[in-house]
Amino acid sequence: MLSHIRTPYADTHAGQLSWRLGVDRVPALAVEVLEVPGGRCELRLLAASHQVIATLDGLDASELVTCGSGAGESMPEAASREFAHLTYRFRSSVVCHDAAGVARAAEGLTATYAEHPHAIVGVYPGSPHAVTAIVAHPGPPLGWSTWHVYPQTGEVVTTDALLARPQDPT
């Protein structure tokens, strides 16, 4: 689903991002809810990045990547947590591009995921390349990937997360 967001980005570069788990729903600018085997997955675009709320086997796991004071810990390159019988794994990276590379990245994300049945893409005001995209991988295991494109700094932030049961192939 493609969403033209009317609210500007609240975050302006990758260094402002932090990461938290277990946060209740925060106000979202656009939401895509998907039914997945054994649960559901909410893909939530925010002015300050994204939130994914995954429900699997009746358990909620909430990932929040955002900016602002008190937002959480610095975004790790890798992390792992246990939620009852579920395992959550997270990875992130930042790649810097020149203006043409940022344009290619943003346009590629929009072209690939705007009509994808398990994705949401937000284009923010100010630049056609100010894009956040989230795509769910229904699994099992359940996973999702995100991209945050900051044309003003040439940064593309990518995250990948996985929520797995012990019996899920990984």
Image (cartoon, helix red, strand yellow):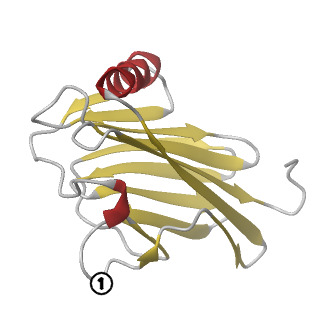
Which residue is pictured at 41% across the width and 62% down the height? 65
- Residue drawn 48% across the image and 67% down it: 75
**Residue at x 52% of width, y 50% of height:** 41
Mark count: 1
Residue at x 11% of width, y 36% of height:
125
Q: Secondary structure at mark 1?
A: loop
Q: Position of residue 1 (x, y in %)?
A: 35, 28
Question: Residue 145 or 101: which is nearer the viewer?
Answer: 101
| Residue type of the residue flagged with mark 1 | Gly
Give percent across and percent down for residue 129: 25, 28
Query: Percent x, y for residue 88?
Result: 68, 65
Q: Is residue 58 above or below residue 140?
A: below
In the image as oriented, which residue stretches furthest toward the bottom?
A: 70
Q: Nearer the viewer, residue 152 or 129?
A: 152
Residue 50 location (% of width, % of height) = 36, 54
Position of 48 compared to 61: left or right?
A: left
- Is residue 109 rendered to the left or right of residue 6? right
Q: Which is nearer the eye, 23 or 111?
A: 111
Residue located beneath label 1 in the image:
70
Q: Is residue 31 above or below residue 54?
A: above
Above/below status of 19 relative to 11: below
How dense is the environment of label 1, judged by Cα within 10 Å: few (below 14), some, or many (20 and up)?
few
Q: Quadrant of residue 2?
A: top left
